[in-house]
Amino acid sequence: MTLKGLLVGFIAAFVVLALGAGFAVKLGLVPVATSAPPLPFETFLAHTALNARVAKEAPQTNPMPLTEPNYIAGAELYRQHCAVCHGLPGQPQTAIAKGMFPKPPQLFEGKGVSDDPAGETYWKIRNGIRLTGMPGFQNSLNDDQMWRIASVLANSDKLPAAVQEDLKAAQ
């Protein structure tokens, strides 16, 4: 087999796969409901792309002083803008969160995001995450507000008692 024949075969296979995928989409065979499982490689591709972008662009230092007043302000902002999807400590998951796909992480359950650098969480709050339902808040919150939320989440395992109680209080 010649190199030209191999190249023609590779191109033909690619065209057949692309056409097949196009027909599957047009015929409604691709699952798009929130209750459907992810497509093959969907999770891998999404996580790989997100992790690479965040590693490239996330700020390395947190400019927000880690003080109780900043934590309390961040907790209040979190309750207003984030808790409906990402939950509160000791509270059941909301109906909105249960119906989303992909499922939003419950940030105060298990390990949460306390092991993530604040800059990574800030980047996600600011920019959102495409095709997940996670909006970007760059047009809704200012930088200080986004850093306060990121600080609360990055330090969720060591927050002052007053902040923990505020987060656990029923809305």
Image (cartoon, helix red, strand yellow):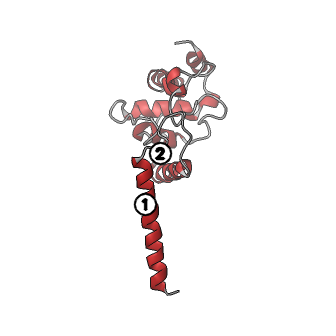
Q: What residue sits right under mark 2 in the picture?
A: 29
For the image, the number of numbered tags is: 2
- Percent position (x, y) of residue 36? 54, 37
For image coordinates 52% across by 21% down, the residue present is: 95
> SS for tag 2?
loop
Q: Please name the amino acid that badge 2 sits on.
A: Leu
Q: Nearer the viewer, residue 25 or 80?
A: 25
What's the CA distance linking mark 1 and mark 2? 15 Å
For image coordinates 45% across by 57% down, the residue present is: 20
Q: Please name the amino acid that badge 1 sits on.
A: Ala
Q: What residue sits right under mark 1 in the picture?
A: 18
The reply, left or right, for residue 15 in relation to residue 116 is: left
- The crowd level at tag 1 (other Cα within 10 Å; few <14, some 14-19, many 20+) is few
> SS for tag 1?
helix
- Percent position (x, y) of residue 8? 44, 77
For image coordinates 52% across by 37% down, the residue present is: 102
- Percent position (x, y) of residue 124? 46, 40
Pick whichever of labels 1 and 2 is earlier in the sequence: 1
